[in-house]
Amino acid sequence: MSDMTTRFADIVGAHNLLIGDAIPDDYSHDEELTHPPQKPAYLAKPSSAEEVARLLETAAANKVPVTARGSGTGLSGAAIPRADGLLISFERMNKVLEVDTVNQVAVVQPGVTLTELDAATADCGLRYMVHPGELSSSVGGNVGTNAGGMNAVKYGIARHNVVGLQAVLPTGEIIRTGGKIAKVSTGYDLTQLIVGSEGTLALATEVIVKLHPRLDHSATVLAPFADFDQVMAAVPIVVASGLGPYILEYIDNMTMAALVHTQNLELGIPDSVRDSCQAYLVVGLESRTADRLDEDVERAGELLAELGAADAYVLEGASARKLIEAREKAFWTAKAMGADDIIDTVVPRGAMPKFLAGARDLAGAAGGGAVGCGHAGDGNVHLAIFCKEPAARKKLMTDIFALAMELGGAISGEHGLGRAKTPYFLELEDPVNVDLMRRIKQSFDPAGILNPDVLFG
Ligand SMILES: Cc1cc2nc3c(=O)[nH]c(=O)nc-3n(C[C@H](O)[C@H](O)[C@H](O)COP(=O)(O)OP(=O)(O)OC[C@H]3O[C@@H](n4cnc5c(N)ncnc54)[C@H](O)[C@@H]3O)c2cc1C
């Protein structure tokens, strides 16, 4: 047994420190499409913040790179460990410590999955509303990526829903930030600096998340449009309508056809409408009372018709759930269709038509394709990129990201940069911003051990 193995095993116990072939393959990757899996030298499963602190202190003293892992559902390669590194899996730190109904927060360990948190908050009528498509993802991973998802249009992203942390710095110091408080104006906001930092600044060992009331009544309105630009033009108008949708997604016709086929969806849309439709808008509405919901659904139908929809299909109960679940599985469908890469670029809502038309043109000129769906209410476009040749694909992706940035957008809206998008970030981002981020990284992590391949390459 090597010296490092003994040291890490002394901290977490021999049973919770795996090396070599004993490390299951699953720990060598997340769900990102392009990077080869990579097993770490050591896999540790700590059970407390103190153990995490000792692991980080030991790793820093010995210059061992460290990657944090929640559930490994990330889509940017940010949880892929280094071959010579330590992977810290939070799977044993999976307790919901408190559901505080007075302050409407839950205090959880980072390894708690969204499914587990949802079950723990169901009885009190509250819910954590950050909803990335993969509910096996962990709260710690949501902190790492600043996760978004379908409900962000109404409830915001992880950044709006994480109000406090206990976190371990790579120096081994344990800090607390924020709290069960609704606001704070006391120095720099360290909570929000750590949220979205992809495990490069500090590791969250406790997370305080906001909870929202569960509304009893919901319905989903599906509107096919013959013209793609009409869908995009409809989005800001639906947002401004006062209907307050908690889901506002677009799905292009190719993606919808693939979802219908792979997920056995029965939407009840006649062939004639389906064949002439370029894209769909999915509008999720919810309310405290059935009457109010009926009123909103009726108004949504009228509004969508005024905006050019061929029709508006109201889905409730199981059929609504099935459509939403199929949309959540769009990534697996794109993967099954042979997508070479995926992007989750964000642009100002009003710039979506220009961005999507530009991205399609760029893909066409490169001899490839770009199809998809997205969190339209947030201007967050998910495209599956089809372009086999690596150099042509790299140029295409660079051009698409550059276009998004020209339009006032950013490379990633919710998946993060990870190993996959870091090279584009370093090429396209303002060097002054990159340098400032580097100095922030240096002050948190002087030894440079936390996820060194992410953000700075
Ligand atoms: C089918 C599918 C659909 C998806 N849909 C969405 C979507 O709609 N919106 C969206 O935002 N994402 C989506 N995702 C991506 C993914 O689910 C989210 O990024 C999620 O937040 C990752 O959580 P995880 O626990 O799997 O994290 P991991 O993949 O394990 O890790 C993600 C990042 O967080 C870091 N990290 C993990 N734990 C900690 C910790 N305790 N402290 C600090 N950093 C930590 C890791 O180092 C890594 O950088 C989807 C993924 C799939 C497979």
Image (cartoon, rainbow, N blue to C red):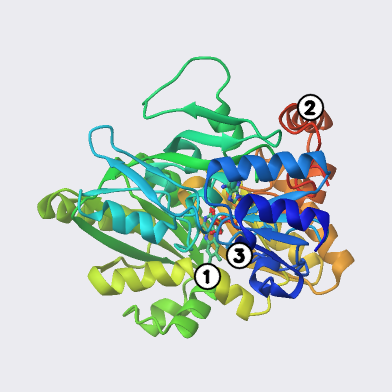
Residue 160 rendering spot, x and y as whole percentages: 45, 36
What is the CA distance from the residue labelled 2 to the residue labelled 1? Answer: 38 Å
What is the CA distance from the residue labelled 3 to the residue labelled 2? Answer: 38 Å
- The one of 14 and 298 positioned closer to us in this rendering: 14
* Residue for badge 2: 439
- The one of 45 and 290 positioned closer to us in this rendering: 45
**Is 387 on the left-hand or right-hand side of 351?**
right
Name the residue type under label 3. His
Q: Identify the residue at image location x=76%, y=58%.
A: 5
* Residue for badge 3: 15
Q: Nearer the viewer, mark 3 or mark 1?
A: 3
Q: Is residue 347 visible?
A: no
**Is 228 on the left-hand or right-hand side of 40?**
left
Residue 266 rendering spot, x and y as whole percentages: 35, 82
Residue situated furthest right in the rendering: 391
Q: State how many labels appear.
A: 3
